[in-house]
Image (cartoon, rainbow, N blue to C red):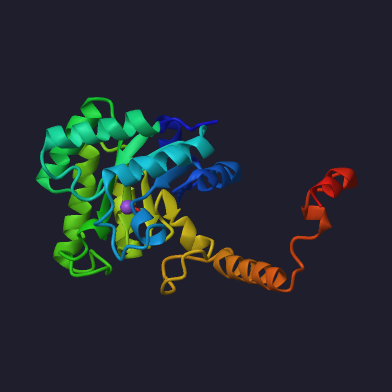
């Protein structure tokens, strides 16, 4: 059954979150018993083939999240608000978040950052009953401005800003905060200081939960090997081998066989000649 926010916040075990982008993804994640599914805007990289998350639209997120929901009706589902959909004012952010909730059946939305503008959005959404998951550290939507996809919070100013951002998100009403690509000790400190659970990716083992991009853990997305991920399967290779085996069978007329074909009565066929 779907975990409630208080249940998620008081979990004795580390929270497990994975991303999903479609119906089978949602189905497998739910059957595996994860605590939360994230329809991440990593959609842009691992499913849509963009080289960043910036081109992903609200329409893309809604389209994919609806499919995930059909596969995972009973799992807590968080949907990323994509780049540009919560940056043009509190009213726009509210309207876009409401669309996601109404059109996809999401339980919560996630957004990146902890600027005063973002904090105001978080406060408005949470006061109006939309649960918000925060996200600090490496923030892919604005990675170019952060100096690229690299570890954050390593120096004095960066560590302070990351801690303050996470604390401010909790104050603004976030029910949980993702910590992406920050040093493990900083993530532990933030996790100790926050009341709400932290969910880490590339943030060490002492967060309150972990999240991975499913296409990384399944070996479907075979971009550069990621230090922060672990491959539990080689589905990309399995898919290539399976398609190649099918191609070879077709060329050798070994597929389809009689078992794959339909039959008809001889006398019907005879009339055609
Ligand atoms: O989009 C995503 O997959 C994410 C996770 C990596 C936290 O934001
Ligand atoms: Na994301």
Q: Where is residue 78 in the image (x, y as percent from the top left)?
A: 38, 40
Residue positioned 33% across, 46% down in the render:
60
Residue 139 visible (yes or no): no
From the image, which quarter does the N terminus lie in?
top right
Depth check: give the residue in front, 270 or 26.
270
Residue 273 visible (yes or no): yes
Depth check: give the residue in front, 4 or 21.
21
In the displayed structure image, the side of residue 222 where residue 100 appears, left or right: left
Residue positioned 16% across, 41% down in the render:
119
In the displayed structure image, the side of residue 262 where residue 158 appears, left or right: left
Q: Name the image quarter holding residue 62.
A: top left
In the displayed structure image, the side of residue 267 where residue 224 appears, left or right: left
Q: Position of residue 35 (x, y in %)?
A: 49, 41
Q: Position of residue 109 (x, y in %)?
A: 31, 39
Residue positioned 53% across, 39% down in the render:
71
Q: Where is residue 249 in the image (x, y as percent from the top left)?
A: 72, 70
Q: Name the image quarter holding residue 107.
A: top left
Residue positioned 46% across, 36% down in the render:
69
Depth check: give the residue in front, 260 or 202.
260
């Amino acid at each position: 059954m779907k975990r409630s926010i208080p249940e998620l916040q008081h979990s004795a075990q580390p929270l497990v979150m994975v991303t999903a982008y479609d119906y089978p993804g949602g189905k497998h994640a739910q059957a595996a018993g994860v605590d939360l599914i994230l329809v991440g805007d990593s959609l842009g990289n691992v499913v849509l083939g963009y080289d960043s998350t910036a081109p992903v639209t609200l329409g893309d997120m809604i389209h994919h999240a609806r499919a995930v929901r059909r596969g995972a009706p009973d799992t807590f589902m968080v949907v990323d608000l994509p780049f540009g959909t919560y940056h043009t004012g509190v009213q726009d952010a509210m309207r876009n978040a409401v669309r996601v909730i109404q059109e996809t059946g999401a339980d919560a939305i996630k957004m990146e950052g902890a600027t005063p503008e973002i904090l105001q959005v978080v406060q408005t959404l949470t006061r109006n009953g939309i649960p918000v998951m925060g996200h600090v550290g490496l923030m892919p939507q604005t990675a170019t401005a952060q100096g690229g996809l690299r570890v954050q919070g390593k120096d004095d100013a960066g560590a302070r800003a990351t801690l303050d951002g996470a604390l401010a998100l909790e104050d603004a009403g976030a029910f949980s905060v993702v910590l992406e690509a920050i040093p493990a000790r900083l993530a532990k400190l933030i996790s100790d200081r926050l009341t709400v659970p932290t969910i880490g990716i590339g943030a060490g083992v002492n967060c309150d939960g972990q999240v991975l991009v499913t296409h990384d853990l399944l070996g479907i997305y075979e971009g550069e090997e990621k230090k922060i991920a672990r491959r539990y399967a080689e589905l990309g290779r399995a898919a290539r081998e399976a398609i190649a085996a099918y191609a070879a069978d077709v060329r050798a007329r070994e597929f389809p066989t009689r078992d794959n074909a339909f039959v008809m009565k001889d006398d019907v066929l005879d009339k055609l000649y």
